[in-house]
Image: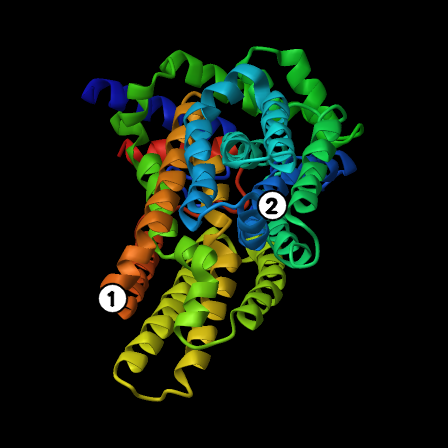
Amino acid sequence: MERESTEYGQTSSLLLTRISPDISCDGERQQSSYFSSPATAVVVLSTLVAASGSYVFGSAVGYSSPAQSGIIDDLGLSLAEYAVFGSILTIGAMVGAVMSGKIADLMGRRGTMGFSDIFCLIGWLAIVFAKGSWWLNLGRLSLGYGIGLLSYVVPVYIAEITPKDLRGAFAAAIQLMSCCGVSVMYLVGTVISWRTLALIGTIPCMLQLLGLFIIPESPRWLAKKTRGNDCEAALQRLRGNNANISEEAAEIRDYTETLQRLSDSRMLELFSRKYTHSLIVGVGLMVLQQFGGVNAIVYYASAIFVSTGFSSGTGSIAMVVVKVPVTLLGVLLMDKTGRRPLLMVSAAGTCLGCFLIGLSFLLQDLQLWKDFSPIMALGGVLVFTGSFSLGMGGVPWVIMAEIFPMNVKAEAGSLVTVVNWFGTWIISYAFNFLMEWSSEGIFFIFSIICALTILFVAKLVPETKGRTLEEIQASMNSFRAK
C-alpha cells in the first residue's frame, strides 16, 4: 500500500504540473486566466433546471409542518402516527443516498435527476389521494427516496458543468432553491389545504423533468464513459459556440484517463491512504453541519418559541424573512470571499445563535430576566438561521462535489450523503429526549460543536475557489503524497 501511494503521488504531481502550470505542488494558486469562462445561457439554464431538484428537496422538508393539523384532523391520525409520517422521509432519503452514486454513474447526471423526479411525483400524488396512513407513509417514503438521490446528483452536476470562477456561486444556488422551497411551503401552507399543498409540490418535479430534455449531460461523466465526441459537444454547448474548449477538454480527458489507469473504483478503494484527506473533509463537514443543531432548530423552532414563551407564528415568519435574503447573500459571496472564510463566519454565527438559545433557557430555569429571555431565544434562532444559511447550509455540498475525483466520486458522494441524512435522523429523533434532559445543556453542546467547526475548517478544509475540479483533486493528491 505504501508503494502504491508513493506511485500515485508521483503521478499526481506530474499530472498537476501538466494540467495546471499555474499551481505549485503545495497547492498555492498563482495569477492566471486559465479556462476562465463567462456564464453562457446554457450554463444558466442547466443550473436552474438542476437546482429545481433542490426546490423539490426544500418543498418535501417544509411540507410536514404546515400540513400537520390538516392531516391529523382529516385522516384521524394520532400524533405518534403523524410522527412516523414526518420521519419516514429521512429513511427514504438514506436509502436513496446509498444508491445515489452508483445510479448517477450508471444513468448519468441527467438520467438520475429524471429517475428521482419520477419517485418524487409518485410520492406527492400518493399523499394527494391518500385515504389513510398507509398511502400517506408510502408516498412520503417514495418522496424521501427521490430527494435522497437529488441531494447527491444536483451539486455534482452543477459543479461539473460550470466554469471554475463561477462554480461556487452557481453551486450555492442549491441552498437558495432549497430555502425557497421550504419558505413557500411554510407560507402557502397556512392558507390552503394539505392536499392542494401536496399537489403544488408536483410542479417543480414536472418542470425539472421537462427541462432535462433540453440541457446537456455532464462533460466529465461523458469523458468517464469514454464518449469523447459527446464530451466535447456538451462542453462546447456549455461554453458557447465561439469558445475555444480544446485545453479544457484535454484537461478533462487527461485526468480521466489517468484516474482510470490508477484504480478501479471499488468502495474499499475509497478508504485507502490517497483519499484520506478528501474523505475527512467531506464526511467531517457533514457531521459538523448536522450535529451543530440545524435540524433541531428547523424541525422544532415552533416548540422552542413556545418553550421560551414567544409566539411561534411570529417567530416562524421572522425565520423565513431572514433565511431567504441571507442565503442569497451567501450565493453572491461564494466566489468572492472563498469557501473557507464563508464557512468560518457561518460557523461562528451558529455558535453564537446556539449559545443565546441555551442562555435563554438557563435564565428561565433560574427565574431571571423573564421578560428578556423570550426575545433572546428569538434572537438566537434568527442568528443561527441567518448564519447557517450564509455558509454551513450550502458550502459543504459544494465542497463535496469538488474534492473527490471521478473514479471514486460515486462511492464518496453516496457515503457523504448517507452520513448527512443519518445525522439528520439522529438529531431529529433524539432532540425531544435531549430537551427533557436539559434544554440549555443541549444548545450549549451545539454551540461547542459549532466552535469546533471553525477549527476544523481552519486546519483541514482546502480553498477551492477559482480552480477547476481537476486542479483541486490533483493538488490535494500531491499534498497527501508528501
Which of these two is toward me, 35 or 176? 176
Give residue 441's quadrant in the image.
Answer: bottom left
Residue 190 placement: quadrant: bottom right
Q: Amino acid at mark 1?
A: Ser
* Image quadrant containing the N terminus: top left
Q: Dot 2: within a 10 Å radius of its alpha carbon, few (fewer than 14), some, or many (20 or more) residues?
A: many
Residue drawn at (39%, 65%) of the image: 348
Q: Quadrant of the C terminus?
A: top left
Residue 102 position, x and y percent, is: 46, 19
Residue behind mark 2: 59
Q: Element at badge 1?
A: loop
Question: Disc 1 or 2, which lies upstream in sequence?
Answer: 2
- Image point (45%, 68%), residue name: 381
Q: Nearer the viewer, residue 47 or 89?
A: 89
Residue 385 in the image: state x and y as whole percent.
Answer: 49, 63
Q: Is 108 drawn above or below residue 462 in the view shown?
A: above
Q: Which residue occupies 37% across, 28% down?
A: 13
Three-letter code for the amino acid on which mark 2 is drawn: Ser
Q: Which mark is residue 438?
A: 1
